[in-house]
Amino acid sequence: MSMKIPFLKKKQKAEESQDDLENVPGHVAIIMDGNGRWAQRKGLPRISGHKEGVHAVNKVVKIASQSGVKALTMFAFSTENWKRPKSEVDFLMKLPKEFLHMYLPEIMDNNVRIKTIGEFDALPEHTKKVIEYAVDSTKNNDGMLLNFALNYGGRYEIIRAVDKIIHDIDSNGLSINELDEELFSQYLYTKELQDPDLLIRTSGEQRLSNFLLWQSAYTEFWFTDVLWPDFDEHVFKEALREYQQRKRRYGGL
Ligand code: V07
């Protein structure tokens, strides 16, 4: 009997704090928007918003991996971002190093594996080098997958998949009759990932902006006015709770 009391207490506590270990989204994707606006509001240059955004990435990685999220995809640099001023692009390309220098030990402690999606080869050599080091160092971690979308564009990803399929038909004996959604998915950057269950976009914008077009066909979207550098564990938990509520509602149908 004395064995059962702590169990009940724990369960009650979980209900009170609304922690819900069921219906945790397996794959969360995030559009980290509002860094420039955050800086402008403080009278700072745009780049200081990007720099501040790096800390928010680490907070979310920690809370997501502790919450039981299996994969977290962060939109760090889009194919459209090359159009920004060169000085801003140069600054952004130094952020992977900045992030990894500060947080790779913590990433290892949390058993997180780092990977990327997007046209990696077109990134500057110095950026590729630090990321390759991080991908290699974390490759045997079997906890959460932290997936950075870098030089990523959803339409390009689809065109690239079509191009690869045509190549496999012409040269590798693939038959057009084999083409279905399952096969097509295997030609995307995300081939080993499940589709995102929850997509979060910060900073009040409610658009997909060429992120995970194919993959988000059935994804729940959650938007917040919070600017990315102000995003923290509380906001993330709010998104998780809302996702869980939606799932419970459908579950009743
Ligand atoms: C970038 C900081 C977060 C706000 C949104 C845009 C700016 C983390 C990374 C990163 C990438 C690869 C990696 C480790 C960290 C990053 C870029 C921009 C280009 F292996 N944040 N962050 N990369 N931002």
Image: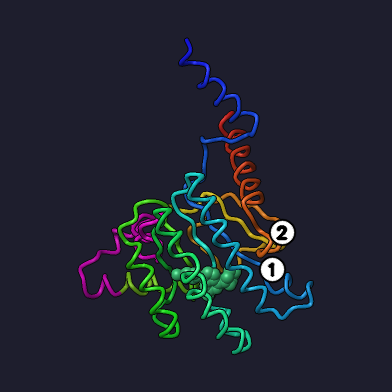
- Percent position (x, y) of residue 165? 32, 69
Q: Is residue 180 magenta?
A: yes
Secondary-structure class at tag 2: loop
- Percent position (x, y) of residue 87? 61, 88
Q: Is residue 248 magenta?
A: no
> Which residue does the numbered mark 1 point to in the structure image?
34
> Which residue does the numbered mark 2 point to in the structure image?
226
Q: Who's the residue at 35% across and 57% down the image?
A: 192
Question: Quick check: 15 above or below 187?
Answer: above
Q: Who's the residue at 42% across and 68% down the image?
A: 116
Distance between the Cα atoms at labels 1 and 2? 8 Å
Secondary-structure class at tag 1: loop
Question: Who is closer to the viewer here, 148 or 19?
Answer: 19
Label located before the other in sequence (1 or 2): 1
Q: Who's the residue at 74% across and 78% down the image?
A: 44
Q: Are marks 1 and 2 in contact (CB under 8 Å)?
A: yes
Indicate the quadrant containing the C terminus: top left, top right, bottom left or bottom right.
top right
Tell me the magenta residue range. Answer: 167-193
Question: Quick check: 225 above or below 117?
Answer: above
